[in-house]
Image: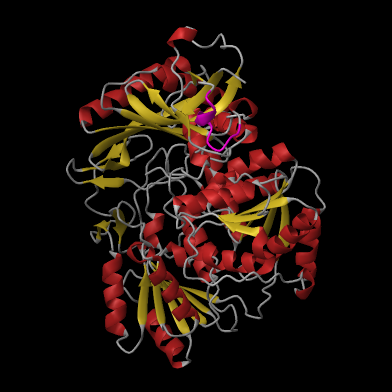
Amino acid sequence: MAQWLELVFKLPLYQSFFYRNPADSETVQGAESAASVSLVGKRAAVRFGSRKLTGFIIAEHHELPKSCPFAAADIKPIDRVIDAEPLFGAEQVELARWMSHFYICAEGVALSAMLPSGKREAGELNTEGFELNGTDFSAAAFNLSDEQTAAVDAITGCNTGDFFYVYGITGSGKTEVFLQAASRVLAAGKSVIYLVPEITLSHQVADTVRQRFGDRCAVLHSGLTGSKRLAEWRRIARGEARIIVGVRSAVFAPVCNLGLIIIDEEHDGSYKSGFTPRYHARQVAMYLCKKHGCPLVMGSATPSVEAWHLMQTGGIRTLRLTKRLSGGALPRIRIESLLSTQGALSGALIEEMRRTKAQGKQSIIFLNRRGFSHFFKCKNCGHEVLCKNCSVPLTLHKSEGLMKCHYCGWTAQPPTACPECGSIEAGYTSIGTEYIEEQVRKAFPDCTIQRIDTDVLQKNKETVRILHDFRDGKIDILLGTQMIAKGLNFPGVRLVGIALADTGLQMPDFRASERSFSLIMQVAGRAGRYVPDGEVIIQTYNPYHPAIVCAQHSDAESFYSQELQQRRVLEFPPFARLIRLVFRSKDEQQAEAAAYSACSVLKELLPAAGVEILGPSDCMLSMVAGNYRFQLLLRAAVLAPVQKAVYRFITEYRCAAGVYIETDVDPVNLL
């Protein structure tokens, strides 16, 4: 039996710690003999300084390793082993080590994020309220199109860790391609991980997968109690469940003999964790598929710009689906300018909503809640003021009387008139979603109206009821945010109205156009899936913006071409890699001083050439939860040397008390 145990903790400590195995059979719960049981993969209760903590046992040693800084007599014994069965194995330890170096986080923090006791996700899956039966449908019952058959054959004919992208218009049958590929992989005795981004989409996918594959399916979600989630985790580890559905953390499921990972709606930002470790499920999936020699299949009607670039350059193989299989035609998309409109609803949108009601059909009004910041807009020509360095909108700081770029820190005086046309009908504005909802209710008192927002999402049963009622035709108009923009399939929807497309475009983020184009295309895809006269109306103050014009014509090729050209000129991803460091503190001066001090240190650590430091600058959200926030952006063509320098900085730099550093490799959200 090994005498020494190596542990890591859910703490920002970039090292492991050694404890003595007390060689007491009672220490190992449920074991006949401590000598015959390995403790690797189990949790242990230990004394850590003056605290009592739970640690993860990652290795056993018969002799005390030379890396241990303490003498054997000074090493404490563990108090007890918590688990009767291991929670993780060598593969999870290896993955945590990779994540530690790639995402610059402590190994114990990375390992903790994988396990059932890890951090809960805001978008986590919950299937409560759905009746999921265990019927196992035969794959032969589903007739595939020639395009779908070719896609499934390509995926399942791959014996190496290749990457595929099922790219097709909304309603073209991407989900069935995923399920047929999964069926063949399961038939070969392997396991499948199926990732979905949103709770609303998760409901439908989980229902479909459970019906198709029965008890072989496991659904990982935060709605389970801790004990049930742990039991489901162990059922997966034992090989009893071989197709796992869940949001991003399901990528860590301890499946046996991994044969396929599916990432539905790959473009969605929720695949990127907002907490340490700030991993991206797509990157983790790529690592796992290369390691296991199995295919990774992604899919979306609007790929991320990074994925599109890889599709064009051969890094990802594209599998195209070009036809709607439900019989509906692509909707007609119209742009309505709000420059001369009073109120939140244009005359054209009101007219189409009334026509839709008269036909006994349904409407969706999409509200983009991202528009919380003030942005400069000319009501005459639609001009907006951009940073001269970064080509992102400047944000007004009223207290300072300045417009600021939250990338490079460049400032400018707010103009008194439009710099483009000279009109004095220009200034900062924003439109609240509550005002838009009020306008809809006033205009349509005879309609049943429901809204799905963050408050409703917290009441899972209420969300399920609303979605069921809308699917059954009991609701005339559904108001919603991004959660209704993708994946959901409502046969009665004829009209989709986008109340204000500009709010996403005005965010000071180089991804603003990409997100807006994707959202417009995704929400437009809810219209006319089963009817030939689907309508989409885009309301905007900027009717000539490329993202809006390309979305109107469903012209993805032109949009991605323009976006990639601009990214190349500005040296933003995918033509450069970013690492973001955020310094936060209750004391504004301390946070700012830490950012400037870190900038000086990093200049010495980073390679002499090929790396650019943007900032320091205050974050777009300059204060969160009472903490002031400043940021540095490190930009380089090659990531590895920058990662190495930042890893050294994070492990060796000591900031002032009360200052905390957040590290984000390949950030998706720069707010």
Residue 493 as seen in the image, left or right of residue 430: right
Position of 162 relative to 616 (above/below): below
User: At 74% across and 63% down in the image, what residue appears?
Assistant: 180
Q: Is residue 188 shown in magenta?
A: no
Colour mode of the rendering: secondary structure
**Quadrant of the rendered image containing residue 98:** top right
Q: Tell which of 210 and 174 is nearer to you.
A: 210
Find the residue positioned furthest to the left: 399
Q: Which residues are magenta?
A: 24-32
Q: Quadrant of the C terminus?
A: top left
Measured as percent of width and height from the top left, residue 416 is found at: 21, 51
Q: Tell which of 394 and 281 is nearer to you.
A: 281
Residue 316 as seen in the image, left or right of residue 615: right
**Quadrant of the rendered image containing residue 595:** top left
User: At 60% across and 57% down in the image, what residue appears?
Assistant: 218
Q: Tell which of 175 and 95 is nearer to you.
A: 95
Q: Is residue 347 visible?
A: no
Position of 56 relative to 267 (above/below): above
